[in-house]
Image (tube, rainbow, N blue to C red):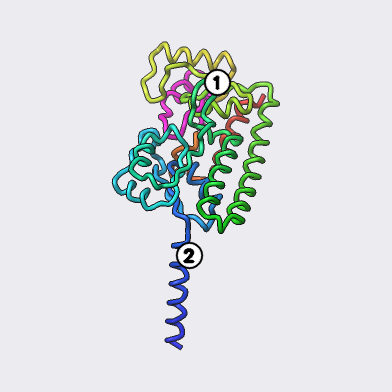
Amino acid sequence: MQKFLCLLATICFLCWGTNVQAQLKVVASIFPMAEFCRTVGGDLVQVKQMVPDGTEPHDYEPSPKDLAEINQAQILVYNGLIETWVQSVLQTSPNLYSVEAGKSLFLIDGKTDPHVWISPKLAMQQVTKISKAFIKADPAHKQEYTANTQKYLADLAQLDKEFAQLQHLSNRHFFATNHSAFAHLAKDYNLTMLAVMGLSPEAEPTPGDLQKVIQTIQKNNLRYIFFETLASPKLAELVAQETGAQAAVLDPIEGVTAERKASYLDLQKQNLAALQKEFAQ
C-alpha cells in the first residue's frame, strides 16, 4: 500500500510539473496588462507583472533580475509609451514575441496619451489584441482563449454601457489634479475634464495656482476634487478646505496599491461611482 501511495504521489507530481511547464510564460508590464493577460489566459498562462504594485510605472526601470525573467518568457505584453525600457529590452531579446496592446490607440485630439485602458471601449481592443497573440503563440488552446476572451469582453461591454449612462446627465464636469490619465475616458463618454494647465499635484502650488483651482471649483459648482492613487493628495485636500468640496480618488489603474488591491472591473466601478457622485444633481 505504501509503495502504491508513493507511486501515485510520483505520478501526480510529474503531471503537475508537466502542466506547469505547459503554461505559456507571459511577462506583462503594468497592472492592467497583467490583469488582461490573466483573464484571457486563465490557467493556461503564467503571468509575471514587471512593475510592482504601488510603483509609479513612468519611473520604473527593470533590474537585472527582472531582465532575466523577461528573457525566460515567451511573450511580453506592454501598453506602449509608458514603458520607456521596453525598446532596449527588445533590442537585446530579438526572439521575444511582444505585444504593444495600446498601439494605434494613443492619439486623442492631435496628441498622444498612453492611458488607453482607462476607457472600457479601448480596453476591449487591448484585450482582443492580447487574445490574438496568445492564440498565435499557443494555437492548441484557441478554444479556451476565445471563450475566456468572449466572457471578459461581455463584462467590459457591460461596463461600457454603465459609463455611457453618464452622457445623459446634465452636469458632466470633473476636476482631477493630475488630469492626463483620464483624457480617453472623458472623450469616449462626452465628459468635460477641468484642469489648471501646468499645475503638478506633486509640487507646492503657488497662491496664483491655488486661486485658479478654487475659482474653477466654485464656478462649476463641483462637489469633488479628484486625485490619483499614486499622487499626493495634498493639493486636493488643500483646495477642499478652501472650497468645501471633498477630496476623492479617481484611480488611473496603472499602479494599484495594496490598500486598493482589486480587479480592473472593480476599480473601474469605483471610478464610475465617484463620477456619478460628482455629476449627481
User: x, y percentage for residue 55?
Assistant: 38, 39
Query: 217 left or right of 94?
Result: right
Give the magenta range.
Answer: 225-251
- Quarter occupied by residue 194: top right
Report, in whole angstroms, how far the alpha carbon at label 1 lies from the one at label 2: 47 Å
Residue found at x 50% / y 19% = 195
Mark earlier in primary sequence (1, 2): 2
Query: 23 left or right of 51?
Result: right
Instruction: Tell me the kind of residue under disc 1.
Output: Asp
The reply to whether the magenta stretch includes residue 264 is no
Q: Which residue is mark 2?
A: 19
Query: 269 left or right of 60?
Result: right
The numbered disc on residue 256 is none
Residue found at x 47% / y 74% = 12
> Mark 2 falls on what kind of element?
helix
Residue found at x 53% / y 45% = 130
The reply to whether the magenta stretch includes residue 231 is yes
Badge 1 crowding class, 10 Å Cα cut-off, few under 14, some 14 to 19, many 20 or more, is few
- Quarter occupied by residue 204: top left
Q: Are marks 1 and 2 in contact (CB under 8 Å)?
A: no
Q: Farthest residue in the right direction?
A: 168
Q: Which residue is mark 1?
A: 109
